[in-house]
Image: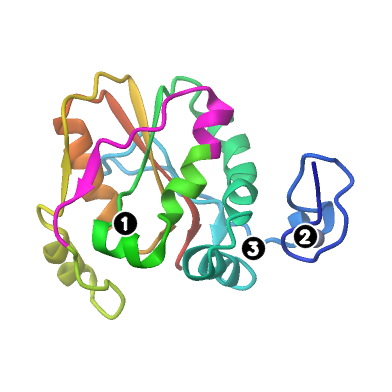
Amino acid sequence: MPLRCVFCGTRTVTPERYICAGCDADLPRIESPPPSMASPFEYDIAPLEYTFPVDAAIKALKFKRRLFYGPAFAELLCAAVARLAPDIDAVLPVPLHWRRRWFRGINQAVEIGRPVAKYLGVPLLSCARRRRATPFQSGLNAKERARNLKAAFVVRGSLPYRHVVIVDDVITTGATMREVARVVKQAGAGKVSALAVARAM
Ligand SMILES: [Zn+2]
């Protein structure tokens, strides 16, 4: 095992780490706000700001299939998740519509969620589906995004889990996460948390 730091290319000191200590210290970290009473989430975690070099890394994972960013991001997320929510018993990546998944070749949320599930020792759920190809969200305001997402997700079967964590790459308005949380709770999950690499400020 490796490794060169995914951000700067220097050899990482700890063999299993994907991010060197220097880059780790320089990452644009943000405090996740404590979920409000109105929030459907037990925890709403996105440790980084969606700015350089995080935005570039996420785009490289999504559009250039730089798959090593998946476990690198998971490395950042696992520590936070294990500390906050030891009762998590399933990981559910936000699904892409099959057509977009097909064009892109990967679902970035799965690439990030898979190593998180492995680290936590819990199942990676693939029972959620995006029912229609929602048009791109960028350029829409919060209200339009929410309307755009209505009934966009379905879950096959039931989810008899205590605490499901939904994984995505970026949280912008949170509309996607809330809509997935709604169907996950409807399917029987007890608590739901949101986990993303970055938050657009
Ligand atoms: Zn580095």
Label of residue 23 in the image:
2
The first of marks 3 and 2 along the sequence is 2
Q: Which mark is residue 174?
A: 1
Residue 8 versus residue 145: which sits nearer the camera?
8
| Whether label 3 touches label 2, CB < 8 Å | no
Whether residue 138 appears in magenta in the rendering, the answer is no
The residue at label 2 has a CB less than 8 Å from ligand 1? yes
Amino acid beneath label 1: Gly
Which comes before the other along the chain, label 3 or label 1? 3
Give the quadrant of ligand 1.
bottom right
Q: Residue at x 75, y 52 (%)?
A: 19
Q: Is residue 81 placed above or below 173 in the rendered structure?
A: above
Specify whether residue 38 is in view: no
Task: Give amino acid for label 3.
Answer: Pro
Residue 87 makes an appearance in the image: yes
Q: Is residue 122 shown in magenta? A: yes
Sequence-first disc among 2 and 1: 2
User: Could you tell me residue 7's position as x and y percent?
Assistant: 73, 64
Q: Secondary structure at mark 2?
A: helix
Q: Which residues are magenta?
A: 115-132
The picture quadrant where one finds residue 148 is bottom left
Specify whether 90 is left or right of 68.
left
Q: Nearer the viewer, residue 86 or 35?
A: 86
Q: Dot 1: few (<14), some (14–19), or many (≥20) neighbours within 10 Å? A: some
